Amino acid sequence: MSLLLTEGLGRRFGGLEAVRDVDLALREGEVRALIGPNGAGKTTLVSMLCGRIAASSGRIHFAGREVTRLPAHRRIRMGMAYTFQITSIFAELTVRENVRLAVQRVADDAALELRVAETLACVGLEGRADQRAGDLAYGHQRLVEVAMGLGQAPRLLILDEPTQGLSDGEVAGFVALIRAVARETTVLLIEHNIDVVMALADRITVLNFGRVIAEGAPAEIRADPVVQEAYLGG
Amino acid sequence: MEFGPHLILALLEGLVQASVLMLTALGLSLVFGVMRVVNVAHGEFFMLGAVLAHVVAGWFGAHPALGFIAALLLAPPLVALAALAFDRTVLHRLGHDPERTIVATIGLLYVIQQLTLMTFGPEARPVTAPFNHRIAIPWIETTAAGLSFYFPWGLSTTSYKLFVVVAAFAASAGVWLMMARGRVGLVLRATQLDRETAQAFAIPVHQVYGFVFALGAGLAALGAVLVVPIRQAHYLMGGDPLLLSFIVVIIGGLGSLRGTVWAALLIGMSDGIVSVFFSPTLAKILATLLVALVLVYRPGGLFGAKPA
Amino acid sequence: MSRALVLHLGLIAVLFAAAFLLPAYHHGNLARIMVLAVYAMGYNILFGYAGLLSLGHAMFFAAGMYGMGLTVRYWDWPMILALPFGTLAAAALALLVAVLALRTAGVAFMIVTLMFSQAGFLVILYFNPITRGDEGFVIPQAARRLAGLDLSDPMNRYLAALVLFSVVLLACHRLVLSRLGRVLVAIRENEERARLLGYDVWAHKLGAVVLSGSVAGAAGAAYGALFGSVGASFAEVPFSILPLLYVLAGGAGTVIGPFVGTAFMFYLRDLAGTVTDAHMLVAGAALIALTLFARRGLMGLVRARWAGWLP
């Protein structure tokens, strides 16, 4: 059964069709990568999924329910989590407070602090829990962002270019983290680093000029001449 | 008086009020448009203009025309200088942050008002008009002999009031020309469109801001100097121009000079007429609620763009 | 017990002791400061925690004051009913204003609240025959009784002010450390992120406005009952600026800041009063100085320098 399903999803900005006619079906438990050249409409697409921007056309179903018109916070409450491409954390608050805000919606008082500590440990930030989030190095801020996604114990975790700007070592750690997470959670991953995509994705969807031009297992996508022309080979 | 002459009189009085309001509101609109900040002390710059006019005119006590001309030439630049000083010492250091600027100009409002009270005193003080001829206005009536002109009792204006209208329109046209043509206008419009890009094109944005803030205050002061021979200078007189300018700028669309001009004429003219039908308090209640609701439902103003 | 709770309980204890130690002049001042501090604490919920800058809180204060005053004056309600009624009136007004004003943000929100408050002030003047807006009216001493106590008696008045102050202070302490308080801070810091953590930003802001307006209304009702006068001047623009000033001075987003700021500004004005009676001059100059030099206010400074735990 599909956890997330879109039918004919599209979005116009004035005369520009940033996304058009996208049919997407995410199986419960899979790791799906969404790739494509810059400006292909990836962020627009996932922004529609989580409700940051409204769809111009088409429909979105999540967990068996139509959510096309639901406001963002209601979709998040149904079990979506979204991590921003441009780091968006509570810079003035401590790392712990950042994560607590993510966790407190899904945990009762008794479990709260334990869950916060677990989530911090999960991304390796337990040693920096009481630092001001805005003071952290960029890579660590990305981890706070990811921790806020994980802390919500989502059914679907949407990661928008999570490894952008990370060092090689940090990327390796991130891949291991998402592997562990993917055992319990469906993941939709926008990613430019093709090694990360190949290491993590069960299936890959390729977007170009707002349309889906290919979809399949990593090996198929790697071999697809259309994809190679549009993206990989280009 | 019959209805016809009465209406003409209301329109004439409305026109005087509208033209001064236009000048004052243009100042507020310019500051908001270019700097994206709200100057809550705008009405106090108006008041300061009127009070300085009284003081300057007093230096030339013997000759009302000389005194008025001196006030016209000196008061607005002095007010503009005071505004420039405030921009340099305070607003500039706040980075012209919108919220902090409002708080600071609220502070300025009370500082100017209370300092004026302490030095100038609580009395209302007049300024003599440089000239003040009564101009009777003819009206047409139908008599047995056909149409004929006559001069209804009370239907008159003064040469000074006509001068106020002409001067205010001329000054507004000057602002308009400055914005629409010329290098200064280009620089201002560029700054308004995009502060960062303007900076990249070597426009000294902070100097532009200082200039605009001073110009806005100067326009308010100019409006006050024009109107002070008709009314009087008083330390609490800044409240109404502030409220009316707010109404004009918001109804006309924030930062739109064209909208400001139309709204000033509309509101200035109708203010006289509305107060015939409503008590002034009720008219003010309706006006403030209208402003609030326009901001809530039509943030682009009634004449401006549709809400996004 | 946390350090913060010790601090807040300690403040209450000191204020209680002061009731019996202070000379009459400061005794009277402090009673007034405590009620005004409640007003400032209400303001702080919205400004300091939810990050919404209102320029119209006088309308809530006045709604509470008139809700109490009119029911006492015309229907002879006892204080035990009139005080909650005033608070409820403020809450209802806050709900109405919130539904409209929350469609805007930032500068527009400031102007909209300013305009609504000004309209409220003018409404009081318009119904002058009922409200006695111009000159105000006095709550007769016989009506200023609560639970058998005469509120016009200085000691009773002080203790009643202290009770209200303590309840609101401890409630703010609880609120700030609660889940709700954390979400308000999250909205202040990064609204979009808060929304995408699944929080209904609009509903939380609405709640913050209503709560903030209710506390301001309670302060207004109490002020009328304790000091015996009701008037339109409490609905005027300067009275909306005062809580902003108090909170900025004491430290926005700190529980104890509003009290510190109120006391500080009250005595600063008192001191300046020996030089000039243009008391808003001090307020104006202080506003400019605070925005320039001390954005975080006194307690914000203390928190940043010495006491990071301060809620």
Image: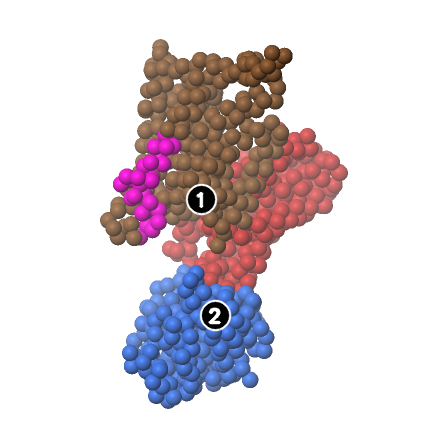
Chain colours: A blue, B brown, C red
Which residue is at 35% across, 28% downward?
B76
Tell whether position B109 is magenta: no
Examine the image and state in which quarter residue C291 appears. top left
Residue B73, position as x, y percentages in the image: 32, 24
Helix, strand or loop under label 2: strand
Which residue is at 34% across, 19% downward?
B69
Crowdedness near tag 1: few (<14), some (14–19) or many (≥20) residues, C-alpha within 10 Å: many
Give the Cα separation between the discs numbered 1 and 2.
33 Å
Tell whether position B187 is magenta: yes
The answer to whether A84 appears left or right of B136 in the picture is: left
Whether residue A37 is visible to the viewer of this picture, yes or no, is: yes
Residues flagged by tags 1 and 2 on a common chain = no
What's the amino acid at mark 1?
A: Leu
Please determine whether, in this image, residue C159 is positioned above or below residue A33: above
Examine the image and state in which quarter residue A111 appears. bottom right
Residue C123, position as x, y percentages in the image: 62, 36
Q: In which quadrant is the N terminus of chain A drawn?
A: bottom right
Q: Nearer the viewer, mark 1 or mark 2?
A: 2
What's the amino acid at mark 2?
A: Gly
Q: Nearer the viewer, residue A14 or A85?
A: A14
Which of the numbered marks, if any, corresponds to residue A10?
2
SS majority, magenta? helix
Please determine whether, in this image, residue C216 is positioned above or below residue B261: below
Q: In which quadrant is the C terminus of chain A drawn?
A: bottom left
Residue pointed to by mark 1: B254
Q: Tell me the magenta residue range.
A: B171-196
Which residue is at 47% across, 30% downward?
B18
Helix, strand or loop under label 1: loop
Whether residue C21 is visible to the viewer of this picture, yes or no, is: no
